[in-house]
Each structure stands twice: as structure tokens, then as C-alpha cells.
Amino acid sequence: MNVVMIVFVLSAGFALFCTLMLVALPLLAAESEDMGRLRQVVEARSAIAKFHAPRLQDTVAGWTSTLSRRFGLQRNKQATEKLEAAGLRTPIQMDSFLAVQWIAPLAGLFAGSFVRGNPLLACVAFAAAGYLLPDIWLRRRIRRHKDRIRRSLPDALDLLNICVEAGLGLDQAMLRVSDELALSHPELYLELQRVQLEQRIGGGRIEAWKRFAERSGTEEVQSFVGMLTQSERFGTPISRALTRFADDLRLQRKQRAEEAAAKTKVKIVFPLVFFIFPCLFLVLLAPAILSLYGVLKDIQ
């Protein structure tokens, strides 16, 4: 039996073992009836869905949820917080990412068994890549989601200030601003909608905003929540604080843009030295070198 066949048999046995363990997990850790009913209610009432999903998406969501319950792929608190920080909050998105985390290493291990040169090393490399790539993609998604919320916050504060000065209360102004930002800034819109829903089910205003600051993980949102907390506690005018805070955010955004522009001067040195200058020297000096070579050849 050659090495390829040994690696293939090992990968198939490992995949079969993982499948059997996934089938046995629901039997080992079955949830109670109360927890099952609560989970069904929470999954049936998605907190941030604006439009009804098409039929194909509903079908895929049902399949994913059924397979997750069948194989015991339950989401822990830390994974749920990371997915929410990345903007993945629907059950189909969470279950799909969890399924990819389980399938990707097995797929990498199976694909590495077909490499002829060094199948053992290829299996290890592909399995490691399948294990790390979902987490790398999730971290990039979280960073991009935070950047979009950070960029959209000054515009939202301007609209909020206009609504407050027009006579609306803070909660009504938040609801109106979230509706206005649905198309231009969907990430912030979903966060504001979730804050409103948490307040409707009985949560306090400050607690809902603090949870929003924890989910976002951005310094600007945390400062904004701190400003709202102080205004709520001491009774200071909210419109003046919103104007000052929006101006500070725009100044910070301008400073970040200037910093990024200043860094490009250093970053462009390496492409110039290694890619542009050699081509430029080749174009400018090649005719002179060829002419000099012809002259020297005629002299000899």
C-alpha cells in the first residue's frame, strides 16, 4: 500500500469518525424542552430583518437549521458575539459559517490526499488552511463592519441633531434616523433597529446603547454612548452635545485620512525601487548600451 492510499484511508476514517461524533452529540447533550421552545421563538422572530426573505432563502435556512440541530452544531456565546460583531445575525448566516468551520478542514484534508509529490504534507497544509481561513475571513469582516459604522456615525448624528431640534424625543429621533439610513448606511441602520427593539421588549435605553457599544467595539460608538449616559444622568441639552460630538468625529476622520495619505509616501517607495525604476532604466539605457556595444564591436 503506497503513501497516497494510506493518507486517503486515514482522511476517510477521520471524516467518518467526525461524522459519527456529530451524530452522537445530540444524544449526549440534548437541550431541555423549555430551551428548545425559547430557541424556536428567538429564531422565528429575527430582530433585524426588514424585508421578507425569498422562498429559496427560507428553504436553505430551514435545511441549515435542521442539520445544525441534527448534528448538534450549537453556537457558543463567544462565537455568537463574533458573528454579531461582523454583522452576521440571521440564523442561516450563523449556521452556514459554523458548517463551513467544520467542513473546510475535512475538505482540505480530502483534497490534500490527491497531491502526488508529498501527500502527507499537503494534507496537513490544506487542513490547516481550511481551519484558519474562516477565522481570517471573519476577522476581516469584523474590521470592515466596524469601519463602515465609524464612517456613517457623523451623518447619523447630524440627522439626529436635526430631529431633536425639530422637537422629537430621543427615541423617536433614533427611529426616524434609522429609517433614513436604511439605504445609505445599512450596517448602522441594523444596529439602531436592534437598539429600538431591545427597548420595546422592556430593556432600558442606556442598557441597550451600552450593548450596542459592546457589539460594535469602536471607540467612537463607546464615546457616543458615554455622552448619552451623561446627558441622561445630568439632564444636559442633547442637541449641543450632538453638534460638538459630530464635529469631533469629522475632525478625527479628517486626521485619519491625512495620516493614511502621509503613509502612502513611504509605502510607494518599495514599488518604485523594485518594479518601476528597473523598467525605466531599461527603457532609457537600453538604446545607449546597444549603441555602445555596436561601436566597441566595430573597433575590435
Image: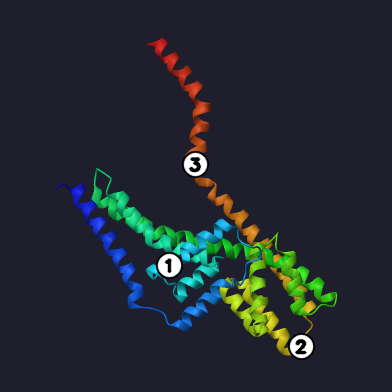
Where residue 210 appears, as percent x and y from the top left, is 61, 80
Q: CA distance from mark 1 to mark 2?
A: 49 Å
* Residue situated furthest bottom in the rendering: 234
From the image, tell me which residue sits under label 2.
Answer: 235
Regarding mark 1 in the picture, which secondary structure is present there?
A: helix
- Where residue 195 sits in the image (x, y, percent)? 65, 76
Whether residue 167 appears in this view of the structure is yes
Residue to which mark 1 is pinned: 68
Residue drawn at (52%, 80%), measured in percent from left and top? 38
Q: Give the residue type that dot 3 points to.
A: Val
Three-letter residue code for mark 1: Ser
Q: Earlier in the sequence, mark 1 or mark 2?
A: 1
Secondary structure beneath dot 3 equals helix
Name the residue rendered at 55%, 56% in the picture.
56
Q: Evaluate if marks 3 and 1 touch, with contact meaning CB atoms under 8 Å apart.
A: no
Tag shown at residue 273: 3
- Image height of 247 relative to 202, above or below: above
Q: Nearer the viewer, residue 196 or 117?
A: 196
Give me the C-alpha separation between circle 3 and circle 1: 53 Å
Q: Residue at x 61, y 75 (%)?
A: 212
Are there few (<14), some (14-19), or many (20+) residues within 10 Å of tag 2? few
